[in-house]
Image (cartoon, rainbow, N blue to C red):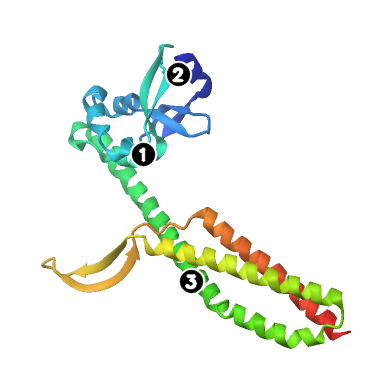
């Protein structure tokens, strides 16, 4: 892509770098994601970009790095390596802090401590959602485990009470819709549980003074991520089932008054 075309897709602004009390250029790509030129980050801490970038490119923090056009303070445009803003915590841990001034080291400590706290809070929230979703999936599967048998029994009891062709047609349609919805939702819930079962598990233990395992505390998923799309689809199934339940109850009331 030519530099001119890239410039049209990138919007440049200035932001305050958290904890470092320093303004840095921010390059916003088409989807609004901000990137920061690595050379600007290095200038703030007094690091040599040319020395560090070749090593950083081998690290995971470079996974989402991009080359973007940056307008320098002198008005020239250069295509430079830029880091996703979310990579800043990893970047701060990717070099020897003895290379920076004591003031910057203190800021690095403050920044990484704050980011670790945010990460821990995010992990706890993910774990809460994971456990809540897992409990809801099991509760759903248990509640609808005997649905097919129950609907078959209802069919045997209710068919003799249906005294019109329209009632028979409506009843069969309700039964078929109910079975279909329950089966679809059940398959989706099982797929979600199977996906959760593939998440690596870590054992949390307590160590004694000699570094030996004193007791096992609990087992936790390493990445307790519940797909937003899958969660949304599951609750959509529940909403459709709720509508079906109301329609079925209304039908039962209608045949009871005939």
* Crowd around label 2: few <14 · some 14–19 · many ≥20 (10 Å): few
Q: For the point 30% across and 40% down, which residue is it? A: 60
Distance from disc 1 to disc 3, alpha carbons, whole Å, reads 33 Å
In this view, the mark in front (2 or 1): 2
Q: Is residue 15 above or below residue 153?
A: above
Residue lying at the far front of the rendered structure: 165
At 17% from the left and 70% from the top, the residue drawn is 213
Q: Left or right: 139 with respect to 171? A: left
Classify mark 3: residues with Cα within 10 Å, few (<14), some (14-19) or many (20+): few
Residue 135: numbered disc:
3
State which tag comes first along the sequence, 2 or 1.
2
Whole-number angstrom distance, CA of label 2 to CA of label 1: 25 Å
- View extreme (right): residue: 258
Q: State the residue position of label 2.
A: 1
Q: Give the quarter of the figure containing the N terminus.
A: top left
Q: Secondary structure at mark 2?
A: loop
The picture places residue 174, in percent across and down from the top left corner, at 73, 72
Which disc is residue 4 wearing? none
Q: Earlier in the sequence, mark 1 or mark 3?
A: 1
Mark 3 or mark 2, whichever is nearer to me: 2
Residue shown at 26% from the left, 41% from the top: 93
User: Residue 230 location in percent, x, y?
Assistant: 53, 57
Q: In the displayed structure, does residue 118 sit left or right of residue 163?
A: left
Name the quadrant of the C terminus: bottom right
Q: Is residue 35 visible?
A: yes
The dot on residue 87 is: 1
Q: CA distance from mark 3 to mark 2?
A: 49 Å
Q: Are marks 3 and 2 in contact (CB under 8 Å)?
A: no
């Amino acid at each position: 892509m030519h530099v001119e075309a890239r410039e049209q897709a990138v919007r440049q602004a200035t932001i305050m770098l958290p904890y470092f009390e320093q303004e840095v250029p921010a390059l916003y790509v088409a989807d609004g994601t901000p990137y920061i030129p690595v050379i600007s980050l290095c200038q703030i801490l007094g690091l040599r970009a040319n020395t560090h970038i070749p090593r950083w490119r081998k690290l995971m923090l470079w996974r989402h790095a991009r080359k973007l056009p940056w307008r320098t303070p002198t008005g020239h445009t250069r295509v430079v390596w830029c880091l996703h803003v979310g990579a800043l915590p990893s970047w701060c841990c990717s070099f020897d802090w003895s290379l920076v001034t004591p003031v910057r080291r203190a800021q690095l400590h403050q920044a990484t401590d704050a980011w670790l706290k945010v990460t821990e809070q995010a992990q706890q929230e993910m774990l809460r959602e994971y456990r809540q979703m897992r409990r809801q999936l099991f509760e759903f599967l248990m509640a609808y485990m005997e649905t097919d048998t129950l609907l078959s029994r209802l069919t045997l009891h209710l068919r003799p009470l249906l005294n019109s062709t329209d009632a028979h047609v409506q009843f069969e349609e309700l039964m078929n819709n109910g079975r279909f919805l329950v089966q679809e939702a059940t398959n989706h819930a099982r797929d979600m549980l199977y996906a959760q079962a593939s998440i690596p598990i870590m054992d949390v233990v307590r160590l004694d003074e000699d570094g030996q395992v004193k007791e096992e505390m609990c087992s936790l998923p390493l990445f307790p991520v519940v797909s937003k799309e899958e969660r949304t689809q599951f609750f959509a199934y529940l909403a459709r089932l709720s509508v079906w339940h109301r329609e079925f109850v209304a039908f039962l009331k209608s045949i009871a008054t005939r």
